[in-house]
Image (cartoon, rainbow, N blue to C red):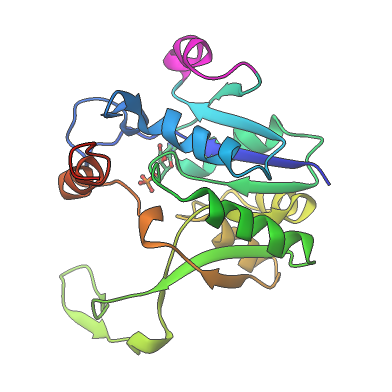
Amino acid sequence: GRVVALVPAAGQGTRLGEGMPKAFVELRGRTLLQRAVAGLLDSGVVDEVVVIVPADRVGEVRADLPGGVSVVAGGAERTDSVRAGIAAAPDADLLLVHDAARALTPPALIARVVAELRAGREAVVPALPVTDTVKTVDLLGVVVATPERSELRAVQTPQGFDADLLRRAYAGSEEIATDDAGLVERVGATVRTIAGEPLAFKITTPLDLALARALTDPDTN
Ligand code: C5P
């Protein structure tokens, strides 16, 4: 089966505060997007990579990435961007969706997700226990509920899917989801978690970027 990795990188990255779309922020001379794509290629289990970037960056990104990587324009929401990526990968048998912002994801995690798909799982997501207690609040910030922490997981990417399942999940919905498995759950599929990796953290805030810079500092590593 042909494995295609979709890399949504069309977010504005306002929470990062670097004044540019997040995927184009540099970490030691390479953008988050370049690092995320390199990790996928290094995993040895991905046949094709499709990156999804802001429409006005398509040309520049094509010039900066390895030859075989496809580049398409994304949309306003992450869901729109992933949808554009799915459309650009009609011959995929297995689809991975991997945030550009998870630039330091170990290639071995990517290989584990694909191995689970090849073993017959239809949807696989890396997950870690949460360390904070998580609460549900109302619009005024008043606590409504406290879910049992031991039952909660923070999920990462790459999330892997049987390609037809992911197509079906996106075809049946105009909804916005913060992860792809969320849409797949709604069509009744079984989503399996596997052990995630702390290094697959999403670079979202200035603190995350400082951590990523420290982790890639040649003087301390
Ligand atoms: O905003 P968030 O951190 O959840 O974004 C996760 C990933 O989705 C990032 O790599 C971001 O560039 C991408 N994204 C996108 N299109 C959007 C919004 C986010 O490709 N409209």
Q: Is residue 2 visible?
A: yes
| Magenta span includes 190 | no
Residue range (magenta): 55-67
Answer above or below: position of 5 versus 175.
Answer: above
Q: Quadrant of ligand 1?
A: top left
Answer above or below: position of 123 versus 153.
Answer: above
User: Which residue corresponds to the image point at 35% horizontal and 90% vertical from the top-left?
Assistant: 148
Quadrant in the picture for the C terminus: top left
Answer above or below: position of 204 versus 59.
Answer: below
Answer above or below: position of 145 versus 140.
Answer: below
- Where residue 151 appears, x then y in whole percent? 43, 86
Q: Is residue 10 visible?
A: no
User: Which residue corresponds to the image point at 28% horizontal and 86% vertical from the top-left?
Assistant: 146
User: Which residue corresponds to the image point at 59% horizontal and 59% vertical from the top-left?
Assistant: 183
Looking at the picture, tell me which residue is in the foreground, 151 or 201: 201
Name the magenta segment's main secondary structure: helix
Looking at the picture, tell me which residue is in the foreground, 83 or 132: 132
- Where residue 218 appears, x then y in whole percent? 24, 36
Left or right of 96: which side holds 218? left
Left or right of 113: which side holds 103? left
- Tally the marks: 0
- Where residue 61 appears, x then y in whole percent? 47, 16
User: Which image quadrant for residue 83?
Assistant: top right
User: Which image quadrant for residue 54?
Assistant: top left
User: Which image quadrant for residue 19?
Assistant: top left
- Where residue 199 appears, x then y in whole percent? 37, 55
